[in-house]
Image (cartoon, rainbow, N blue to C red):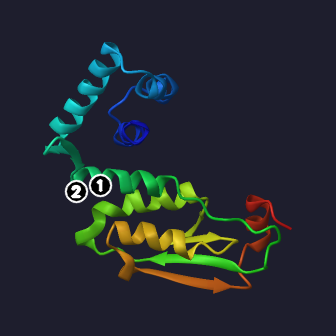
């Protein structure tokens, strides 16, 4: 039931975030008619949207539902920050072709969410290794072949970047 609650949160089939504790409490609480109605309504809504299908007294997540869960996982990604800065700058450069342009904005939003800073057009920078997290995001959007990684020791505007990233 907890996994179902997490799935509901992930697909946006629940009220706003401030209501999540109440929803989880209801889902994990006892087997009451009210809770059964609530879960039935949520499952019906997930089936209606194509996130879940019923098969042999069980619920299965569809490819559409899996895709939404995977995207929610990506929004939760974080880059581990070492205690000390190594002095290197890690750069992501990408050139997404026109036929895949619909993923450009979501990809950029993920980079911003990870904490990368815009350096120049299609070039983003970060002071710690972030290749694994960015590769997962690029793979999800099927643009891995259009994303490159660079490691640099000297970069123009380093002092400004150090201040923005709060490193010494």
From the top left corner, tell me how far across and down residue 115 is, in percent. 61, 59
Q: Which image quadrant: the N terminus?
A: top left
From the top left corner, tell me how far across and down residue 33 is, in percent. 30, 14
Measured along the vertical axis of the image, is residue 47 above or below residue 168? above
> Which residue occupies the foreground of this view, 65 or 133?
65
Image marks 1 and 2: residues in contact by CB distance under 8 Å? yes
Mark 1: secondary structure: helix
Q: Is residue 84 left or right of residue 5?
A: right
Which residue: 76% across, 69% down?
82
Residue 21's disc is none
Q: Is residue 168 left or right of residue 129?
A: right
Q: Look at mark 2 in the image and give the residue it sits on.
A: 63
From the top left corner, tell me how far across and down residue 4 is, in percent. 36, 39
C-alpha span from label 1 to label 2? 5 Å
Residue 66's disc is 1
Which residue: 45% across, 23% down?
29
> Which residue occupies the foreground of this view, 7 or 153?
7
How many C-alpha atoms fall within 10 Å of the one at disc 2: few (<14), some, or many (≥20)? few
């Amino acid at each position: 039931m907890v996994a179902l609650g997490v799935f509901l949160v992930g697909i946006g089939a629940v009220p706003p975030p401030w209501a999540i504790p109440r929803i989880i409490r209801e889902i994990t609480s006892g087997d009451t008619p009210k809770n059964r109605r609530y879960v039935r309504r949520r499952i019906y809504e997930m089936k209606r949207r194509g996130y879940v299908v019923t098969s042999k007294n069980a619920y299965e997540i569809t490819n559409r539902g899996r895709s939404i869960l995977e995207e929610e996982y990506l929004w939760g990604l974080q880059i581990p920050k070492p205690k000390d800065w190594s002095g290197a700058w890690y750069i992501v450069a990408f050139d997404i072709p026109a036929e895949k342009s619909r993923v450009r904005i979501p990809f950029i939003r993920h980079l911003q969410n990870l904490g990368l800073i815009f350096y120049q057009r299609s070039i983003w920078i970060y002071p710690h290794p972030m290749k694994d997290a960015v590769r997962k995001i690029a793979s999800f959007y099927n643009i891995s072949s259009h994303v490159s990684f660079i490691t640099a020791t000297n970069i123009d505007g380093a002092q400004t970047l150090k201040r923005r990233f709060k490193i010494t």
